[in-house]
Structures are given as C-alpha cells and as structure tokens.
Amino acid sequence: MKNLLDLTGKKALVTGGSRGIGHRLAQALHDAGAEVVFFYNSTCPDGLAEQMQGNGPAVHAVRCNVADRKALEHGVTAAADLLGGRIDILINAAGINRRYWLEDFPTEEWDAVINTNLNAAVYCTQLVGKYMLAQQYGKVINLASMNSFVSGKRVGAYVASKGAIAQITKAFANEWGDRGVRVNAIAPGYIMTDMTVALQKDEASYKGILERIPEGRWGTPDDLVAPVLLLVSDAADYINGIVMPIDGGYLAR
C-alpha cells in the first residue's frame, strides 16, 4: 500500500528557511523525502544546507530578500532551476514583527511588515503557482497566526498581515482548487522561537498566555511538523482553503 505521507521525489521551496519555524519545516520536508530549496535573507549559518542534507536528498540555500519583488523573482527562478524545473510544495514561512502603538507606527516599519508577511507570500505564491498550475499539482502552505483570529496591542501591522493571509489563502484555494493546486494555512499558537523572545521574557505576558492554553505549555516548532506534513502530502488532496490552528487549545478559551 502506498504511503500517502511519503514525500520522496517531491520538490519543495521554503521561504524563511534558515531559522525558527521555517527552518524546522524545511528540515521536516527533507526528512520525509523531499528535495528542498530554502530562502534566507541576509545571513545563513555556514554549512547549514549540508548539515540538513546529510545522506538524504539535496538541500539548497538561496539568498533572497522576499520583500523585494525583483529579488523574489530571481530567487524563485533560481529555486526552480535547482529543482529541475518543478516545484511541488511551497511554504511561505518568512515573517517579521514590529511593535509600536498604532498612533505612532512608523510608515517604513508598517510597510516592512506588510511587504514581508503578506505581499511576499502573495507574490511568491503567484510566481511558484505558474509552475504548479502548469504541472497541475501543488501544495502551498501559508503561515497565518493566532492574530489571524484575535488582535493584540502594539502589533497592528502584524495583525493586519496575518488577517489578510487567512483570507488570501482562501482566495487562492477558490481559484486554483480545480486546477490541481491546494492552498492552506497553519495558524501557530504561541511558539518558542526567537520572534517571541520578548514575550517569553515578559513574566506577566508569558504567564497570561500560558494560563489560556489548555495544554499548559507554549508550543515548539516540532508541534507544527506533523500537521504540515499532512497538508503537503497526497493524503490531504481533499483539504483546501483551511486555516488550521495549532495552538494547544488557545482559541478554545
């Protein structure tokens, strides 16, 4: 019987793949059998691609500022060339956050968050989608957030970007579902990465969040692996346009 979760022979692109959630998901795709290209912005630990590859399929690191449209065009072309002209899986994991009160939110910082979290994901999906639509097969995973459902203070740009990610995921799913391309999103809860260090160090915030999570702990990038492997696999061919919370029950309270 065919293992529907096996990604052997699949070709994958992961943005923001050198650190945090993106890195863990890139490694998970590779461990499941996929050849992987990951984008990094400015720095990448020496030998990271080789370390990830081990004795498995190839892993390629491509420097790409996803917030720059021209750079993203070149990056996707380079990724497709490295992957032999085929891209089966796209994970839009690049993301940033900036914290300001809305009345004082600097325009350049607002634009940086929207361009990285939203516009880059949309444009990257459009670019990769050309390959997927031509081959009539593809799986796209966007990174939504708890802030796709609930808001917060001093995260206005992040909230706006993640709310829009949830909706654009559904829009792509509507347009591409009958053409062989499934587009879904995961909405991680509070995950222990370098992006949440400030919250982790704020005792009151950390405790308040923890008290709302029925599982009684913050998540880790490992908690996202199994749901993502399901969504990008052939086992999820009838799952399209969802925004899946992976939050330890946070939204249930």
Image (tube, rainbow, N blue to C red):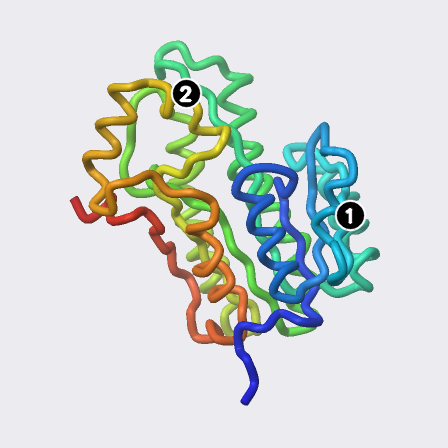
Quadrant in the picture for residue 116: top right
Give coordinates of residue 151: x percent, y percent. Answer: 29, 32
Q: CA distance from mark 2 to mark 1?
A: 31 Å
- Helix, strand or loop at label 2? It is helix
Above or below 107: residue 63:
below
- Toward the left, the furthest residue is 253
Res 94 → quadrant: top right
| x, y percent for residue 186 | 42, 52
Pick out the residue farthest to the front.
55
Question: Residue tagged by mark 2?
Answer: 198
Q: Residues within 10 Å of mark 1 (few under 14, many from 20)?
A: few
Q: Quadrant of the N terminus?
A: bottom right
Query: Can you give x and y, in whole percent of width and height, for residue 30 in the image?
Result: 65, 59
Relative to 192, is 140 on the left or the right?
A: right
The image shows residue 215 at horizontal and vertical percentages of 25, 47
Q: Which quadrant holds residue 164?
A: top left
In the image, 104 versus 5, the foreground residue is 5
Circle number at residue 231: none
Nearest the viewer among 232 and 68 is 232
State whether residue 244 is above or below residue 134: above
Mark 1 sits on what residue? Answer: 50
Q: Residues within 10 Å of mark 2 (few under 14, many from 20)?
A: few
Seen from the viewer's position, the closer of residues 90 and 7 is: 7
Q: Say which quadrant the C terminus sits in.
A: top left
Q: For mark 1, give the secondary structure.
A: helix
